């Protein structure tokens, strides 16, 4: 059987490019309009996407007000509220929410995701993040942001607690015997009793075990600590490769780490983010890209670069190469990626800012055939297992991908003609984990 491509849709913000909401025909209020969100997810389900993926922020983006006033991300829905509503208007597409391990409690996260998995009948996924925005700490009673490595140690323990809580009840614990009056079997209830470096959680979770056993575990970190956490825990990685060689290197590194841990290769899917712009011709697609980039105001470019580098780029010589930078406590992988881009293309700070001011990551720009060619090459040369697609604007970019690119991928046999399962795990080809307390093995992949 031909290897199959997996597709997620990155939908918060609904457009990753700074200028998406200014593009002609854009639904400028899409981030905070339920009717638009319903239209988008139903179109994605028509296109047989694996999942609708929501990022999240615990604070306004840490940039100056001149840039912030031009950002469409200043208002958007809380993920669980929105995804619970969208579960009611869809049947198959997965629902992935970001939830921080830095500023939340494991019991809250376990309960919310278990509930979402039941509400959606097995379509939930948890994107584990260690929040990098230092301003978020100020919203949770902290004066300073937690150190990078400490955030990842906390995340690892957080994962253990949450998954342990999901296993509180055996799958067959609930008898609901109306004649005898016995609702559940106490022998099939486990009290976690966790005590660790960061958390003390008694349990049990008072929600039945999720439909999928565990919601699908997604991870997005690309630093050394992030890669190791992903190799140990993730079932999907939301990657950030800039080109196919970078993708192959990351793919090989993660799978080498997994093998060292005894995990099977097929127990994890790597889906790098990709901005897609298509047109009837290559030239038409490039004109769309040019128009999109022209909508980025200069007020946005340097603050965006500063936020992603973790330093104030405005104090640099804008017409000189990017200088050596101090280590950041924010997103180390974002900083490293931008430094590599600047060095590889010999960019000045001004040029780098202009790229980042719009979107500086992986792009596929061309005809549906050209885009399908590129995606198939990534799939077949072990650079990725698919992509988390980002649209240059909505609804146009989303509609064009579903109506033009998906049929081309389907024609080649690298993308499904129809959903064959009902859960997100089934879409992704991931096994349902056994209950660690009521089965001989904790996870089929370990």
Image: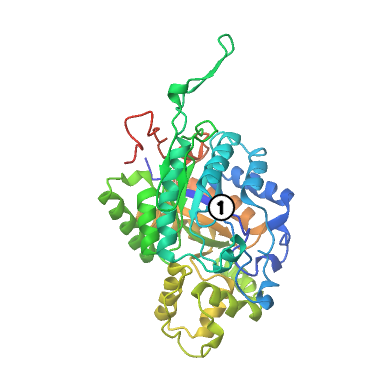
Residue 348: x and y, percent?
A: 49, 86
Residue 60 shows in this picture: yes
Q: Position of residue 105 (x, y in %)?
A: 53, 49
Coordinates of residue 138 in the picture (x, y in percent): 60, 66
Quadrant location of the C terminus? top left
Q: Is residue 69 left or right of residue 160?
A: right
Q: How many numbered marks are there?
A: 1
* Residue 222 visible in image: no
Q: Nearest the camera: 54 or 60?
A: 60
Compared to residue 393, the image places residue 3 above or below, namely: above
Above or below, 260 against 110 in this view is below
**Crowding near pointer 1: few (<14 within 10 Å), some, many (20+)?**
many
Screen quadrant of the N terminus: top left
Relative to 301, is 237 on the left or the right?
left
| Residue at position x 49%, y 75% in the image | 309
Display colour scheme: rainbow
Q: Where does the image place residue 51, in percent across and percent down from the top left? A: 54, 46
Residue farthest along the top direction in this orientation: 179
Depth check, front residue: 72 or 153: 153
Residue occupying image coordinates x 43% and y 67%: 333
Vertical position of residue 393 compared to residue 302: above or below: above
Residue visible at 55% across and 33% down in the picture? 207
Choose between 300 and 45: the one closer to the eye.
300
Left or right for 90, reference 163: right
Classify residue 379 as left or right of residue 397.
left
Q: SS of the residue at dot 1?
A: strand
Residue 117 in which image quadrant: top right
Mark 1 — residue? 9
**In this orientation, which residue lies closer to the viewer: 296 or 95?**
95
């Amino acid at each position: 059987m031909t290897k199959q491509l997996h597709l997620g849709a990155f939908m918060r913000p609904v457009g990753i490019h700074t200028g998406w909401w200014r593009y002609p025909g854009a639904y400028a209020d899409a981030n905070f309009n339920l009717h638009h969100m319903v239209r988008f997810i139903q179109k994605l389900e028509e296109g047989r996407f694996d999942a609708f993926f929501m990022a999240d922020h615990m604070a306004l983006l840490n940039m100056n007000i001149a840039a912030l006033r031009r950002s469409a991300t200043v208002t958007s829905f809380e993920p669980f509220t929105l995804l619970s509503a969208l579960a009611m208007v869809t049947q198959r597409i997965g629902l992935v929410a970001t939830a921080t391990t830095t500023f939340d409690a494991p019991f809250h996260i376990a309960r919310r995701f278990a509930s979402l998995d039941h509400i959606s009948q097995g379509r939930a996924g948890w994107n584990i993040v260690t929040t990098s925005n230092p301003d978020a700490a100020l919203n949770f009673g902290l004066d300073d942001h937690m150190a990078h490595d400490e955030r990842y140690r906390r995340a690892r323990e957080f994962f253990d607690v949450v998954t342990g809580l999901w296993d509180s009840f055996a799958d067959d614990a609930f008898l609901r015997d109306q004649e005898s009056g016995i609702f559940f079997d106490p022998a099939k209830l486990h009290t976690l009793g966790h005590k660790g470096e960061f958390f003390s959680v008694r349990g049990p979770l008072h929600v039945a075990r999720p439909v999928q056993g565990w919601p699908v575990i997604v991870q997005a970190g690309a630093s050394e600590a992030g890669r190791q956490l992903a190799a140990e825990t993730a079932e999907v990685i939301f990657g950030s490769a800039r080109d196919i060689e970078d993708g192959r290197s990351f793919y090989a590194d993660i799978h080498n780490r997994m093998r060292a841990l005894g995990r099977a290769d097929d127990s994890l899917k790597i889906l790098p983010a990709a901005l897609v712009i298509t047109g009837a011709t290559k030239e038409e697609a490039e004109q769309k890209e040019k128009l999109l980039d022209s909508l980025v105001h200069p007020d946005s470019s340097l603050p965006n670069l500063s936020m992603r580098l973790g330093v104030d780029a405005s104090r640099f010589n804008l017409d000189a190469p990017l200088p050596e930078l101090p280590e950041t406590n924010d997103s180390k992988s974002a900083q490293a990626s931008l430094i590599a881009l600047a060095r590889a293309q010999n960019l000045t700070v001004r040029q780098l800012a202009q790229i980042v001011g719009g979107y500086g990551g992986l792009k596929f720009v061309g005809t549906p055939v050209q885009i399908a060619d590129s995606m198939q090459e990534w799939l077949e040369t072990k650079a990725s297992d698919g992509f988390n697609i980002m649209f240059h604007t909505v609804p146009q970019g989303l509609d064009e991908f579903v109506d033009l690119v998906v049929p081309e991928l389907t024609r080649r046999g690298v993308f499904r003609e129809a959903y064959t399962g009902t859960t997100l795990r089934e879409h992704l080809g991931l096994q349902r984990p056994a209950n660690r307390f009521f089965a001989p093995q904790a996870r089929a992949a370990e």
